[in-house]
Image: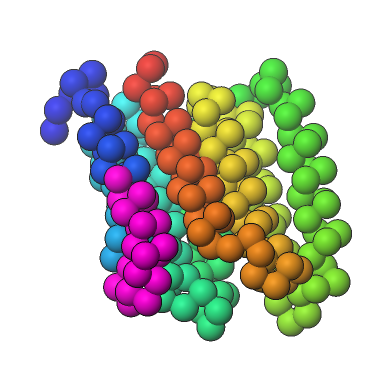
Amino acid sequence: MKNEKEISYMPFMVVYVSAAVIFMIVKIFVPDFTASFVIKVIPALTLAAAICFTGRLALSQKIAMLAGALFCGAGDVILDIDRVRLFVPGLAAFLLGHVGFIILFWMRRVSKSPRRIWIIPVLLFSLAMAFVLVPKLGSLLVPVMLYLVVITLMTMLAIVADVRPLAAVGAFVFMLSDAMIALAKFVFNGHPSPLFTIPVYFTGLFLLGFGILLSVRSK
């Protein structure tokens, strides 16, 4: 394996973005393509590959981050196969992915971080989402609220962790994409559409994952 100083994340970023763009083109022009999940999972797998080449991340942190990326990839596959019938398994996969990132951010947390003020708007956003969603959730109240708690915690820890602000922004964008998916499913009858929410998700995971890796490399 190369020394961390010799590793460029640019090839991984190019593959990530290219796969995300190709996936969206397929969804727009060939919406009935049943194997689109093969393309959709490539960004998460590309991030996982980049993590494996990271030399300056402690092994425990690398494992936690790798779990985060791989479980997000599993969620990508599950929801692309059937985002209605497999909603709860997909939700569970992404929840486990967030737990991986939570562990990483917890290990890299900074006591009395000057960025901790930004936790307040994240909490307000989370509370607003709970207020809107709770009356609409029915039997899915517990899993969806558990997911909201977990992704909120991940975003809060990203804010106070020893990572670039880019990673914290990515965590919030990820949270925003999931909020839009929840609103589309439970409140606004399919709006915004996946053609809008999925690019936001790809952006969030990109900023989150590569923001962390660039933080480590800069040390």
Residue at 39% x, 26% y: name it: 214
Magenta-tinted stretch: 18-37
Name the residue nearer the viewer: 125 or 203: 203
Name the residue nearer the viewer: 142 or 138: 138
Does the image show residue 109?
no
Residue 184's spot in the image, x, y percent? 67, 66
Give the main secondary structure of the magenta stretch: helix
Residue at 82% x, 68% y: name it: 134
Tell whether 108 sits left or right of 21.
right
Q: Is residue 129 above or below residue 216?
A: below
Name the residue nearer the viewer: 197 or 120: 197
Does the image show residue 127?
yes
| Quarter of image, res 189 | bottom right
Residue 36 is inside the magenta segment: yes
Residue 33 is inside the magenta segment: yes
Quarter that holds the C terminus: top left
Residue at 56% x, 55% y: name it: 197
Name the residue nearer the viewer: 16 or 153: 16
Residue 97's spot in the image, x, y percent? 48, 55
Name, please, the residue furthest toward the front.
29
Quarter that holds the N terminus: top left
Residue 118's spot in the image, x, y percent? 73, 29
Tell whether 201 sits left or right of 61.
right
